[in-house]
Amino acid sequence: MRFFIIKLLILLSFFSLSSNLLASSSESIKVNPTHKEETYKTKTLSEMVAGFVKLTGIAALINPDPDELNAQGKKMSDFHKSWGRIIMILITFLLFYLAIAKGFEPLLLLPIAFGGLLANIPVANIAGEHGFLGVIYNMGLANEFFPIIIFMGVGAMTDFAPLLSNPKTALLGGAAQFGIFGTLVGAVALSQYTDMFSFTLQQASAISIIGGADGPTSIFIASKLSPELLGAIAVASYSYMAMVPIIQPPIMRALTTEKERKIKMKTMRKVSNLEKLIFPIMVLILAILVLPESTPLIGAFMFGNFLKESGVVERLNDTLQNSLINITTIFLGLGVGSKLAADQFLVAETLAILALGIVAFSAGTAAGVLMAKLMNLFPGTKINPLIGSAGVSAVPMAARVSNKVGMEYDRSNMLLMHAMGPNVAGVIGSAVAAGVLISIFA
Amino acid sequence: MEELNLVFEGLKFMVLGMGTVFLFLVILIFAINIQAKVIARYFPEVKKLVMPTPVIQKNTNAKIAAITAAVLHHRKLQSKAKNG
């Protein structure tokens, strides 16, 4: 075996020598297929083995190359090259566990976590500009393209009938956006008066949009306003959305009385198909008139919904709801995962983002519930405040949580469809809020 | 001065943001209500008329015979069950 390798080496070195001679003798051949061989220097076997060992993952993790650059072509610290990567890989394993064993938004968490695993591989530089994660990121995340496609699919999956039959519940979806702006003020105040963290207005806005509980919107805003925080924001956003059934119920119980939780809402009127067909166009026209900056998100959302409600393009509707959104989800997840590289994720800001994110989420939930209580002070049909929490988007998880908590107090109280109203209004609300933030920084 | 400004900016964002969100949704609520009224008034959903299924003349006699036979058979079975 060894003899064979030596023979091969001799052969190779001879070949490189001869091609060298060839290249020098005839200058006309500048770019030739033996270009690689030209730069190949003859090595002894021990040199080769040493070179190979240097490029193994073990060596790169223990004793990283001092000149190695991160995906953005900047220098990174030794910690991020060695222990940082190991820690990040362990974190992705934790995410695998949460997604598979605990069922936390596995559709997104698994691609994100695997992307994170790949992005933390030393030497291979998969998240770099020419690595496939880098290509995916530049293809659809850097230009905010994938979130828009996801919005089309979500639009095709959304049924606005509950909102149309009880439109005033839309106010709950508006109140829940307080989570975004309340957190924004809090984040700016904390970066101003304490040393805990220092976020700019753009960064604070991008972080607080987590309170909208809408993954695509968060990614859309983050990649527009502060792409450097995208990974942490996306991970926070999707993990909190997955944890809606854990985060929301305590807040809902704390803010309501037992009597309020048992309020029964009257059955909804039937909504005609024509109403459902006109609705997306109406929302879009409204968005065009009030806030054109929100139309990329709302336009895509309503496009999907319009195709669905038109009833004549079942094939396109089916594609939007299934194949297209699935393909995009894979790419979106991997692209976000590429931002889980140690040098970008293992920074002090990430902890602050995770903390602010949960504050934003809780504030939104609380604002929705309180808004329902406020509306009950006025004459008219009463609203069960439990559906207020569904005003944060997180469709349809938040609505299911409202239903579940309601059933705990009255087995016969079906709140699901009533909660879908504020739920879909929350999607529109957070898209509007996103449009406001974009228009401020435009 | 600079420091004060940042929080104040944040508050302005909040007023503008929440104001726009509510304005948008309130207009939307009105629009939905108007739309519902207009549609109910001028374009009521036409209940699909149940078309009387055209009776196929062919084989009518044979069918009647079959049904009669079946009914008779059924009655026979029932009377048997009662007696038995």
Image: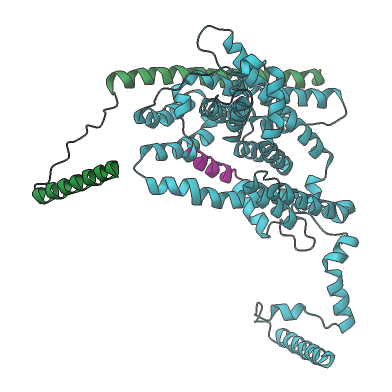
Q: Can residue A109 be seen here?
A: yes
Quarter of the image that includes the C terminus of chain A: top right
Q: Place residue A255 in its image quadrant.
A: top right
The image shows residue A142 at horizontal and vertical percentages of: 63, 46
The image shows residue A108 at horizontal and vertical percentages of: 64, 47
Dominant secondary structure, magenta: helix
Q: Which residues are magenta?
A: A143-155
Q: Can residue A64 be seen here?
A: no
The image shows residue A52 at horizontal and vertical percentages of: 83, 74
Q: Is residue B68 left or right of residue B83?
A: left
Q: Place residue B47 in its image quadrant.
A: top left
Q: Nearer the viewer, residue A13 or B70?
A: B70
The image shows residue A16 at horizontal and vertical percentages of: 76, 85
The chain assigned the colour green in the figure is B
Q: Is residue A1 left or right of residue B57?
A: right
The chain assigned the colour cyan in the figure is A
Q: At x 88% / y 75%, what residue is drawn?
A: A50
| Residue A433 among magenta residues | no
Q: Nearer the viewer, residue B65 or A299?
A: B65
Q: Place residue A346 in its image quadrant.
A: top right
Q: Is residue A400 above or below residue B8?
A: below
| Residue A150 among magenta residues | yes
